[in-house]
Amino acid sequence: MRKLSICIIVVLLFTGFAMADEFEPVETPLLETLSDMADGLVADISRELRSGGALYTDGITFNNRPSQLGDLYTSVILAKLSGSDLRNLSLYGDDAQIPEAMNSSVYLLTGDIYKLSNEVYLSLILRKGEDDQIILVSEATLPLEADVAMLLAGGFSGGAAGGGDNYEPNNDASNAYPLELNSSVGDISLQPSGDIDWFYINVVDAQNTFLSIGTTGSLDTVMDFYGPDSPDLLIASNDDGDNGSNALIQASVSVPGTYFIKVAGYGSDETGSYGLFVNSEEYVAEEGEPNNNMSEAEYISGASLSLEKKLFPSGDEDWYKLDFSGMTFGAEDSVRIKTESILDTYMELYQNGSLVLSDDDGGSDGNASVIFSPVTGDEYYIMVRGYSSSTLGDYLLSVETIVLELDSYEPDNSQEEATVIEMNTTQNHTLIMSDDIDWYTFTLNRPNNVNFETFGDMDTYVIMYDNQGSIIQESDDDGTGYNGKISMYLEGGTYYCTVALYSPGGEVTDYSVGLSSN
């Protein structure tokens, strides 16, 4: 009596082996390959067991754990044996209970799978159950392609005993694990501390390919992307580009070839499980392209609008010509232009063909922003790009009119308009990030050790001048956080200081300034 269901085996052979939810069914070519591999082994088993008996399969394991690739190969072998003319041979799958007392007619088929750099090695052994005598050894190799790799990892949960996972060893580029485009894998482990995981993808059609590669889960991951055809050609890196502390890289690929992905923890002690996805899409230029230089700039009209835009391909620049015709601006009116996205954007403002403002992180979360007061009749252009050439993806461009809320010390934009600040006092001021500079002056009746510093959340730059306007000292981040602070011994006399934003452009920001002696 044959204990293995012929119906189930037929389904396996023609529809693919049932895998974990995150994987697609195995394609027929792999089954055909396994079927061809099994032919010789089945013929040998048929000769050895021509007198009949009971054949039990005891698992073809990978890293000493159950493997869907091993299960599938076992099913193929048993299916072929079921279709043979061995009428007195009973077949038992892996779920059957192996008898404790075995006689000379009981046989065991076991095996191991080993992952080499670019191949999978399968070793199967047929033994007599009575005395554990080896009567047959079969060896075969498979190319480590994506469908094979997914079967090796499929069914794994929680990491292999003692750390690691079924994707290991993949600690260097030579052992990188293959992934398919538009796929995701889970239950990958960074284990033990300091573990690094390498993966690779093959891109065949790269004419307008846009890749999104990211991690999922709660680990704080760092990702590097390399290629083509070399793990030494760095394309992009990312730390916290996606939800929480997950890494996300978006890159355009214009050259076919093999591309490598390296995943590590932000710190060497970062351990645990994570997932990885690789999504691919063909880029279709959005309305307004090409707008890659000033002469091709896209016209945008008005000062109350938002546009959905995309940076693509690598190195893309988006240029816009601002049309304020028919608009009237009041004395306190300004225009703010900013991006909103997960991207790290950079922006430049041109007035009558000349660069007048630039900004990197003046907006929120790495976005760029500039504020300016338009002059009627002047031409204005905005250029938006990624901070690096590999910064790609969607962003929202917003143009709006704002009313500047000037503090009571304005105007204080020149040495002649400098605000007097007394020793051992503080004042509250506002900087308009576009290009505002606040001037201060103080007088010492005798030599003294002086501290001039700012307080607040913004990145200030402080300069101290003598009475003739010559620079004495400058400071960027010498105070608390990113605040500027100048501490020095000064002779008696009159001095001037300026406070500006380190990177002009962005929101209206409040800060405090203090003058003290010690």
Image (cartoon, rainbow, N blue to C red):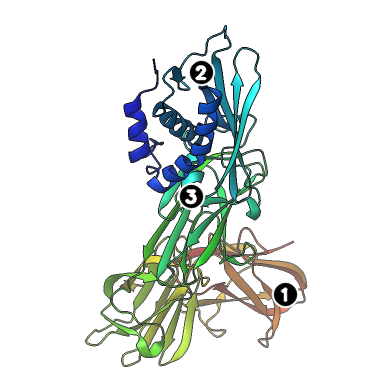
| Relative horizontal placement of residue 59, taking residue 85 as reference (left or right) | right
Image location of residue 177, percent across then percent down: 56, 49
Q: Amino acid at mark 2?
A: Ser
Nearer the observer: mark 2 or 3; the answer is: 2
Q: Which residue is mark 2?
A: 51
Q: 357 above or below 49?
A: below
Tell me how many marks there are. 3
Query: Which residue shows up at 50% across the image and 60% down it?
Result: 202
Q: Amino acid at mark 3?
A: Ala
Nearer the observer: mark 2 or 1; the answer is: 2
Q: Which residue is mark 1?
A: 445
Residue 153 appears anywhere in the view: no
Q: Outermost residue toward the top? A: 101
Q: CA distance from mark 2 to mark 1?
A: 115 Å
Image location of residue 350, percent across then percent down: 43, 86
| Relative horizontal placement of residue 108, taking residue 424 as reference (left or right) | left
Q: CA distance from mark 1 to mark 3?
A: 79 Å
Image location of residue 452, percent across then percent down: 65, 68
